[in-house]
Structures are given as structure tokens and as C-alpha cells.
Amino acid sequence: MMAPFLALCCFLGLAHRLLAQSTFDPLAYVDPLIGASNGGNVFPGASLPYGMAKAVADTNSSSNQGGFTLDGSVVTGFSTMHDSGTGGSPSLGNFALFPYTNCPGGDIDQCAFPKKARARFGAFANSSVSAKPGTFGITLAGGIRAEMTTTQHASLFSFSFPSTGLDGQPAQPLILQDLTDLADSRQDNGSVSVDSETGRITGSARFLPSFGGGNFVLYFCTDFKGAEILDSGIFVNSRASAAVKNLTISRSINGYPLPGGAFVRFKSGAKPILVRTATSFISAARACSHVETEIPDFDFAGISNAATEAWRVKMSPIKVSTKGVNESTITNFYSGIYRTMINPQNYTGENPLWSSSEPYFDSFYCIWDLFRSQLPFLTITDPVAVAQMIRSLIDTYRHVGWLPDCRMSLNKGYTQGGSNADNVLADAFIKGIKDGINWNDGYAAVVKDAEVEPYDWCCEGRGGLDSWKSLGYIPVQDFDYKGFGTMTRSISRTLEYSYNDFCISQIAKGLGKTGDEEKYLGTSEHWKNLYKADQTSAWWNGTDTGFVGFFEPRFLNKTWGFQNPLNCSNLDQSSVCSLQNTGRETFESSIWEYGFFVPHDQATLMTLLGGPEAFVRRLDYLHDQNITYIGNEPAFLTVFQYHYAGRPALSAKRSHFYIPSFFSPTPDGLPGNDDSGAMGSFVAFAMMGLFPNPGQDVYLITPPYFERVAVTHPTTGATAVVRNVGFDPSYRDIYIQSATLDGEPYTRNWIDHSFFTDGKELVLTLGRNESAWGTHVDDLPPSLGHYAGFNGTYSAKRMTGATGVRSYRGEFGISGNKWGS
């Protein structure tokens, strides 16, 4: 652990020096409430970067996956564990607190204890909500003001009360803590105890993860300060007693956990009552240790300021010129960056499942979403944290047997497609992330994904490997007796497994494993086996789209099945497209959209689809006909895939089509679940003007949304700069006319990671019309196959055969291409 610690110290020192040199404060442009309604499902509360403690008010919304919403719902509690931006069931929200100014008539049974009953006291005005990095506040309609902040494992709440309660009697505040979570998933027996002298509440309960199998036990410890204790006790359902201090409660038999918990009542509410609370997966004693060591003095201002400063340090590497730019654009950008550091969460020291000196991160929720842009973004802005995450993933493989595709609350989450942790490891490996990572173990982990089928491939690894190896694709209605998972998604799994294998080949290459490199490059071409050249696509009314050639499912006997290429598109309101047993052969996306998911071999795909002009027409149709859904991650790369057809200007145009129309800095401003910062990272990358093809050392260049963007690498200290000449803040002049890199002419429409680590300067001269910049064959990003057909208007260099081609085989000295050009 010493090397990451020293690197973090260096980073903190560098960041503080940067802050000292500039008065620019990125936190002034962070709005945590973006995505707090309309299904964004963000966590808008108080947290440290990657912190385990996440404090916020919980509402009873149907979209309360992140705890709090601004959709007219009411507050039912204040809790300290959350995820951010997830779909599925609500996540965490365990052991919620709820305050009352008094109980009418002084009778504790007149306070409402169950979550559903106390909701009637949780109304609030949206204007009362305040949120900034590290703190959150809200005022309930009854006049109670709640403020909260956090350390790594503990939360500190401050409750201020009116002088009288609703009955007009003097305040004698009661604060309860219950044994529920957001999803009401408590299992078996929950327990709680309250100390009659100190008011300390401790307890535990068993809960279910929100998107996976298994269960987990969580413990808590809560202390109070600010007023003399009147009495304390426990409650069961709607009744409470100050005479009873300990409770063990069952779930009950009616499918809803029987309400239960503890309370502390105070003699006065004249001063704010402070509540420090922490959770632990180890023990209640560990939770108490967290509150005692991290919040020893109940110093709200000190804890809040430290949390805000931690965020300021993490946000400091990226600075933009604000000249001429609307403030909402800057807020959109920095708020997106902020959301990339909520999840995953650093649970190091809180993993009871195995003993290890390695870091342990949780809430990889889910890697199918995160590999595309969120984790690649952190590779630039926080490589120390990424190294810790990679070490955690590899350590999970050591002790569980496979890399996770999704993991939350110490449990295996459901795998949505391929073994996409392979992509995450490859992306970090090729970008030089080291910091204590055992890459030999990392390579063993990704190879196991490719070669060994787990019994429960629902939640790790890959399924159907016998068919994959013998047929070169995953069949629809596969016969798989070695492992078990939902027998759907045969197209999307085939495409994702193909890319997973390409990513493995890149790690093999870097480790000098030439035979493995060739092997996995070969299997990375399996996607071709589901391409049906004569397949047409028609709308549901029978109107032909005019495009031919799509992926389609195939059976074990190699005959073709059929799925309408428009099924599971943004316009399909009837198909089942997730993990249900009745699901389609593509996951949360159509064949139309998955038709572009060959990230490593765009050249060959383009040839199959009719060449660059046809490729562009198809991309346009995908977006213009609203087939794709930018609120789901498979759409991200399609915005920028025009680069591969020699039309980078169209990528820039498409980026501005979606931002800010679909991504705006308002509570309802996200087009879908933020998915642990995936949406935020899409916005941040797009507005920086450098978008990754994850798992490859490639960033696709478009003009930034600012005159200048500077990124200081946290470990090398070098500052990379992208500067626009002729910048137009009205965004009409968004097309690159020419470029220089470190003062030399630069025509490639992509750049590699050394741009950031070495601190290079990219200067882009902009204009109002599309130019020939980045359109030549030699300017295109690497591809496994050969580019062909570049003899149109925007290709100034006519190409025949493989002349002038850039490919992964050619670039890395691998000869031969059985598909040719």
C-alpha cells in the first residue's frame, strides 16, 4: 500500500500547488442536483470522492435509487449508504434516521415510526434544498432543517428544530433510527440496542443487493450531541417503549419487513442536535471506531470544509477557459466530472469475505456501463485511484475466481453482456497504469474469462464457451450444460466477447505473449460469423429502411434465426430487452445499434456495410431516426464513429446535437440513469474534445466546447492543452480546418494517451465548414482490418488495396489479414 500512498501524497501536493497558482474554483460550477429527477437516479448528497459514507435525505419516489429525488416525493429518512445513477431496485439507504420536533402531548406513541407512516411529515420545498460537493441540506415542511456531511466511513448530521412542535408545545426532539433500507429488503432478524446513558444506538441487519444474488450483513453505530437526553428506547411497528433498550425483530411473513428500530428523545431543541453515524460490514464495534476516529469532536464545519477541499483537490487537474462561454455549459462540464468520482466506492478494510492487503472497491455498478467512458476518464484525471480499482478487481479474481462484471454490497452483480472487466484491465494496461498492479495475475484473470466457463455465468465470466470455441459465435437457444445464465443476448454477447478477446490480445502483446496475441486477435473476429449480408430492415408498418446487411442470431446447426433489427431500439415499446428469460438477442439495444459495436475493426465493418459513404449514411439514420438512445451507454461511441469514415466533422456536429439538448445542467437534465457517472463522463469527454475508444490507446479529436482546456496529469505533473483558434462560443464554427501538435502540423483525427502523460499541446484552427482535415486514410484511427473505399469527396488521398493503411496488425507488426481489403 505504500506506493499508492506516496503517489497520492504527491498528487495532493501537486494539486495544492495548482490551486495556489489560480483562483479558479471548479467547485463553483458543480451542481450535484443534476439528474435528481426524470430518472437520472443520481446520488446528490454528501460524500468524499469514492467514499463509503454517502449521506442524503431519502424520498419515497419510484426513482429513488440514489436516495433523494426532486420529483414531488417526500422524505422518509436520512441515511448514510447509497449508490449513484443505478437502475433496477433502489440500492442501500440502510438504517435511516428521522427527526421530530416533539411527539404530540409528550406521548412517544404519537410520533409516527414506520417509514410509510412518517412520510406524511416529510414534505419539503425544492427551494429549501442545498447541495454542493461534501454537504447537503434540506428543510422539512414542519421547520426542521437537516444538514449533513461525511468522512470516508462516517456521516455527521445536524438537525435544527423549531422552538415548538406542531401541537404548540416546546420542542423535545425525538430522533429515530430504523432497521430498513430503500428497497425494504431486510431479511431474517435485525437487531438494535440503545444505551440509556449515552444514547448510542448500535445494531445490524441482513439485506439484499439491488442487482445481484446473495445478501449482506451491515452494522451501524450512532452517537448524539447537542442536548440532554430525556429518554430512549425501541419501537416495533407503530408502538414504542422507553423501558425496553434491546430489540431483535423478524422480517415478518407478509413480504414487507416489520418496522423496528430505536429512538432517543431530548429535553430541548434550542440548539442543533448533531448525529454522527457510521456503518461497517465487519462489526458494530468497527462502525463505532469509524465515528470515534473520523468524527471525534462533532465538528460540522471542520468535517464539511475537509470534504469540500477533498473534492477541490480531485477536481483540480482540469481547467478550462470560461471566456465567452455560458455558465450553464461550464456547470454541465464540471458537474459531469464530479459524478465520475461518486462510484466505485473504496471499501478497503471493510471486506469480511477474505483477508488481503490489497485495496477493495465495491459498487462497480456495472462495468458494462463503466468501461465505455467513466473509468477511461478516471485514467486521465485520477490514475492512482484507477490503479487501486484494478488491483481490487484482480484481487476479487484471486479470491472469488473470476473478474466481476458488476459488483455491489460485497455481492456478485448480474452480467449484462461480455466479460467487460477485460476491457477495463486492457485500457489501464495500454495506458501505462502500474502502481502495484500484478499484471501477470491480471492477465491470468482475463484469460480465465476467455477459456473457463463458470457454473453461474449469470454473474461472472462468460457462458456458452463450448459453442464459442467450436462455432465461433454464441448460438440462439444454445445447448450449455456446463454453466447457467439467462439464455438470451446471443448477438450482443458474441459481439462483446469478440471485443473482450481483442482487449486480451493487447495485454498479451504488451507482456510479450505473441502466441496468445495471435490467438485472441483471431477469436476477436468471431463477430463476422453473425453478419448476414442480405438481411434487410423494415419499420413495423412495412416501410423499408433502405439498408441491407445486419447481424442476426444463428442456431447451433448454423442456420439463421431472425430478430427485427429495430427491436429493442429507442422506438420499440413492446420488446423485452433486459435479463428476462423472454429477452431478445441484444441487451438494452437494437441490432441497428449493436451493428456498429466492432470497436477494434471499424475498417472491416465499414467494408461489409458498403464503404465509408454508406457507413456515414447508416450512422446518420441511426441518430436522425431516433433509433439510438443517448441515455444508454451503447450509444456513446456511435456519436464519434464518423471519425473512422474520415468524417470527424460529423462527429463534432453530432456531439453538439446531443449536448445540451439531451444533457442540461438541471435536475431533469439527464436522458437516462447516470449509471455511476457514465453519463457524466460522456459529457465531460465530449466537451473536452477527446473521446476514447475504450480498451485502445485512442482518443478521437473534436473541438472542445471551450477556447482552452488544460489537463495536468496527477502523477507526471505534465499539463496537456487543447486550444481552439477561432473559437466560437455560439458553436457555429465547430469544424477543424487544421491542427498542430507541439507546433508541428498534425492531420490524424485521433491522439494517444501520451498526450496527457507527456503534456503536449494540440492547437485546432476552427471554421464554419467541413474541411479535409483528418479525412485521409493515414489520418484514421487504428483498425484490425484494412481501410478501403476512401475515394470520395472528403478523402483527399485515393486508396487501393492496403496501401497507406493503419491497422492493429500493421502497427504492431502482425502480418496477414484473412479478410483483406
Image (cartoon, helix red, strand yellow):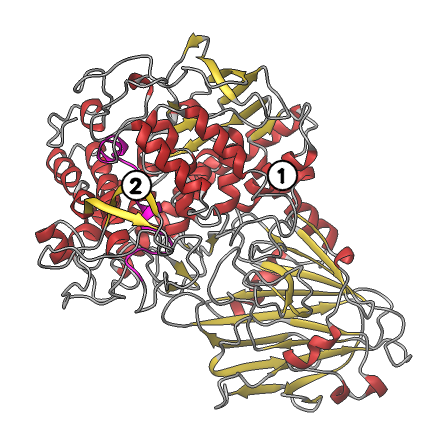
- Residue 295: x and y, percent? 65, 58
Residue 547 badge? 2
Q: Is residue 255 above or below residue 314?
A: below
Q: Nearer the viewer, residue 139 or 685?
A: 685
Indicate the quadrant where residue 659 lies. top right
Could you tell me how far apart the alpha carbons at marks 1 and 2 are, in whole angstroms?
Answer: 50 Å
Indicate the quadrant where residue 277 lies. bottom right
Q: Is residue 416 above or below residue 479?
A: above
How many numbered marks does the figure carry? 2
Q: Which residues are magenta?
A: 584-608
Left or right of residue 127, residue 637 in this image:
left
- Residue 493: x and y, percent? 26, 53
Mark 1 Cα within 10 Å, few/some/many (few <14, many 20+)?
A: many
Q: Is residue 714 above or below residue 234?
A: above
Q: Earlier in the sequence, mark 1 or mark 2?
A: 1
Name the residue type under label 1: Arg
Q: In what element is the residue under mark 1?
A: helix
Work out which quarter of the rendered image holds the C terminus and state it.
top left
Residue 535 badge? none
Indicate the quadrant where residue 248 lies. bottom right
Residue 312 badge? 1
Left or right of residue 153, residue 415 in this image:
left
Look at the image and tell me whether residue 434 can be seen. no
Name the residue type under label 2: Phe
Residue depicted at x 74% and y 60%: 138
Look at the image and tell me whether residue 527 can be seen. yes
- Residue 217: x and y, percent? 45, 73
